[in-house]
Every structure is written in structure tokens, then in C-alpha cells.
């Protein structure tokens, strides 16, 4: 009799639960928030957790006064370390009152008053990578908190995630943001370990494809904790066959840039050109207060930014390589193409590119440039001048670690 009663009670309980859970919550990311790769500034590369209200305000001011905002950089994203080590009595996250004495909402309002957008960081695990409160178990509560603050961007990391799967964790947070109701760009920072390009499109607007970047051309920096950071060319070639997964509102993210951080101007130039060729989100990671005029000129090169922001949204690819000299190509809208010659070697190289002997075919997206059928005008995007047509070979000297980027226009 006990078993019969227990079974009946369980049936009623399940029936009641089912009847009471009839509300269909909207799921999936907010569509259309990142139709071109997002651009902005992130605090991590230079400042780590040493962030504060003064830094953010100064960064916002310089972003506007320097022309960075006009060039397209419109997100300010505070990375790890913006909160206290514990949640409050209600379980809410608490912005650090020492770092942000006027509160996070007032700071966000200040950034918005400059015509800019604001982003925050958290993590899918129990703690962030720097040991602050993670979001695991608090997804919907945190999403409501972010919506109330008025943020526009969430970077969501992958530390301390034992026992959960990446697709599940990121889907949960994506749905939580949607239910909270404020359109927020969702950046998946899962490092590419679980192939987010294969499942991330309905969940996020961009996804990291690698571990953290390091300010060098082609190195691996090994940390004592048994993980590595990577030079920008290591990241550029880390993943194979993923460009077909990237496009408007679903971008392969090659990490924040190190332009202006420790490399020389030539390497910074190459770094920026590659991120534009790869259609990567363009997030600066340098200290604007110490920025040289050369760094600013690289970051605000409107012709290179136009390559990155092209409405076609197709990631470039390596077309050829010989003796350290590489040729990268990218199809653009209106039948245009971009070619970047990159010198990976430690010595100068001679470029001699015969267009008539090189028909470029994009196997993933079906675009083709046949220079025997179509003649293109050539513009050098670093020198900002037209330099002839594809009827003649392109010939130039190219210094070590340097690039030449050409736009081809029918």
C-alpha cells in the first residue's frame, strides 16, 4: 500500500510540476548586435586586475579625443577584477567600492554619455580566472544584474569549470541574458578547447579560438602554472579550417590586440593587418595614456579598418608561402580583394607577385579572382595611394616581420 501511495503521490507531483512550468522562455543570443567585428578596448592585457574608475574615465575621454571612437572603437570592457571577493547577502555581485567609489552604474552612465558602450567580464565556473565570484549557479541572477546596470557586452571566461560542459554552460548564460531582456553582445571566452565555432553561432556573437595572446611576433610564453600565452602569428595559424564558421554576428575571435605593448612598430603594424585580414574583433589592450603617435596611426588606419569591417564578413586565408614570405588574401564586398604580403623571416625579402600566374580561389565561400579575365586597380593601404594595376607584377622589398597590404578594385 505504501508503494502504491508513494507512486501516486509522485505522479501527482510530476503532473503539478509540468502544469506549472508552461512558460516558454526565449532562448538564444540577441541577433544582429555584431554584424561587423566589434571594436573597442579591454583592460586585461595591460592592467590585469589593477583597474579603477579613474582609468576607465580617462580611457573613455582619450578614446573620443584621439579619434579612436570615430574610427570605430566604441566598447570599453572591464575584464577580471572589477568585483569584490564575495557576493552580498542576496547573492548579487558587488562592484569593488575601493576601485569604483561612485558605483558601477555611475561609471557606465559616464561611458554612455561619451557615446560609447560598456562591457563587463565574468566566468562560467565557480570562480573567475583571478579568483573572484564566478557565475556558475547564478546565471539568471547575474544576467538581471547586468541588465539593470545597463551594460552592452559580456565577456564570459572558462576557468574553474570542472564538471560542466562548455555548450551547456554558454547556452545557459546566453538564455539568461535573453530572458533579462537587455540586448548584450555575448563574447564566449572558452579558448577554443571545445571547438566553439561548431556550436557557438546560436549562442554568442563571437568566440575565442585560442588561449591568451602575448606581445610577441611568433613566440610561445610558458607560464609557471603550466599554461602558455601565444604570439599573434601563433594564434593566427593555431586553428585549421575554421574560417567557414565565421561571419556577420558570429565571429572567430583571435583575442585582444597587443598593438602598443612591447613589440616594435613594424610588428604592431603586421599584427593589426593580420587581425583585419582575419575579420577578428578589434579590441585594443594598450594604455591609451602612454600611446605613441605611431601606435595611434596604426590603430586608426581607416583603410585597414574597412577591410576588417567589410560587410561581406569573410575571414581571410593564407594563399601561399615560400622562404618565410607569405601571401594572405581576403574577399571583400563589391568584387574587391585584399592581399597582404607578410615576411615571417628574420631577414628582408623581395616580393615579386605575378598576378597573371595566380588565380585566387576561395574554396570555402566560392569567390574567385582571375587576373587574366579582370584587371584590378591596386591601392597600397599603408601608404594610402594607388600604385597601378594587376596588369604588371607587384614588386617590392619587404623588411623582416613587416607587411604590405593591397586592396584590389575591379
Image (cartoon, helix red, strand yellow):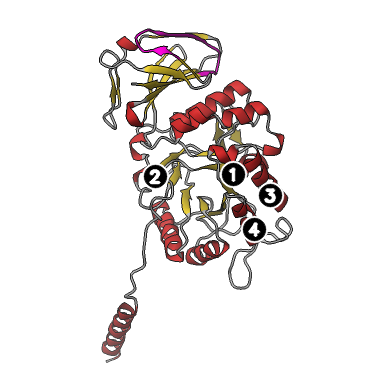
- Residue 406 locus on image (x, y percent): 44, 20
- Residue 121 locus on image (x, y percent): 56, 52
Judging from the image, what secondary structure is the residue with disc 4 in? loop
The answer to whether residue 38 is left or right of residue 267 is: left
Q: CA distance from mark 2 to mark 3?
A: 30 Å
Q: Residue at 28% of width from left, 24% of height from top?
A: 368
Q: Nearer the viewer, mark 1 or mark 3?
A: 3
Label 1 sits on residue: 42
- The answer to whether one can see residue 65 in this image is yes
Disc ID at residue 57: 3
> Quarter-wise, where is residue 360 in the image?
top left
Q: Which quarter of the rendering shows the N terminus?
A: bottom left
> Quarter-wise, where is residue 212 in the image?
top right
Are the residues flagged by discs 1 and 4 in contact, CB closer than 8 Å?
A: no
Q: Is residue 31 above or below residue 344?
A: below
Of residues 141 and 181, the one drawn nearer to the viewer in this rendering: 181
Q: Which quarter of the rendering shows the C terminus?
A: top left
The answer to whether residue 292 is left or right of residue 267 is: right
Amino acid at each position: 500500500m505504501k508503494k502504491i501511495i508513494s507512486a501516486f503521490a509522485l505522479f501527482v507531483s510530476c503532473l503539478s510540476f509540468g502544469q506549472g512550468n508552461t512558460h516558454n522562455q526565449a532562448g538564444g543570443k540577441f541577433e544582429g548586435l555584431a554584424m561587423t567585428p566589434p571594436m573597442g578596448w579591454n583592460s586585461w592585457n595591460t592592467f590585469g586586475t589593477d583597474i579603477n574608475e579613474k582609468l576607465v574615465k580617462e580611457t573613455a575621454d582619450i578614446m573620443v579625443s584621439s579619434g579612436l571612437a570615430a574610427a570605430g572603437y566604441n566598447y570599453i570592457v572591464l575584464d577580471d577584477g572589477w568585483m569584490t571577493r564575495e557576493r552580498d547577502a542576496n547573492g548579487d555581485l558587488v562592484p569593488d567600492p575601493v576601485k569604483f567609489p561612485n558605483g558601477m552604474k555611475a561609471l557606465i552612465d559616464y561611458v554612455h554619455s561619451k557615446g560609447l558602450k560598456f562591457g563587463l567580464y565574468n566566468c562560467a565556473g565557480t570562480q573567475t580566472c583571478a579568483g573572484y565570484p564566478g557565475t556558475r549557479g547564478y546565471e539568471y541572477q547575474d544576467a538581471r544584474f547586468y541588465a539593470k546596470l545597463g551594460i552592452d557586452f559580456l565577456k564570459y571566461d572558462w576557468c574553474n569549470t570542472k564538471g560542466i560542459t562548455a555548450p551547456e554552460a554558454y547556452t545557459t548564460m546566453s538564455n539568461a541574458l535573453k530572458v533579462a531582456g537587455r540586448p548584450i553582445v555575448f563574447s564566449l571566452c572558452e579558448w577554443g578547447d571545445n571547438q566553439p565555432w561548431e556550436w557557438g553561432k546560436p549562442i554568442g556573437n563571437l568566440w575565442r579560438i585560442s588561449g591568451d595572446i602575448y606581445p610577441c611576433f611568433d613566440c610561445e610564453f610558458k607560464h609557471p602554472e603550466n599554461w602558455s600565452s601565444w604570439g599573434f602569428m601563433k594564434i593566427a595559424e593555431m586553428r585549421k579550417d575554421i574560417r567557414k564558421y565565421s561571419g556577420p554576428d558570429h565571429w572567430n575571435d583571435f583575442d585582444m590586440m597587443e598593438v602598443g605593448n612591447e613589440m616594435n612598430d613594424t610588428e604592431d603594424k603586421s599584427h593589426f593587418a593580420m587581425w583585419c585580414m582575419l575579420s577578428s574583433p578589434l579590441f585594443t589592450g594598450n594604455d591609451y595614456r602612454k600611446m605613441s603617435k605611431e601606435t595611434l596611426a596604426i590603430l586608426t588606419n581607416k583603410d585597414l579598418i574597412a577591410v576588417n569591417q567589410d560587410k561581406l564578413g569573410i575571414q581571410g586565408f593564407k594563399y601561399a608561402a615560400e622562404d618565410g614570405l607569405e601571401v594572405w588574401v581576403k574577399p571583400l564586398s563589391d568584387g574587391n580583394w585584399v592581399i597582404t604580403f607578410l615576411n615571417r623571416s628574420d631577414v628582408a625579402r623581395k616580393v615579386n607577385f605575378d598576378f597573371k600566374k595566380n588565380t585566387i580561389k576561395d574554396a570555402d565561400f566560392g569567390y574567385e579572382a582571375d587576373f587574366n579575365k579582370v584587371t584590378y586597380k591596386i591601392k597600397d593601404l599603408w601608404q594610402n595611394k594607388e600604385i597601378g594595376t594587376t596588369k604588371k607584377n607587384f614588386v617590392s622589398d619587404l623588411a623582416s616581420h613587416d607587411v604590405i597590404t593591397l586592396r584590389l578594385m575591379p
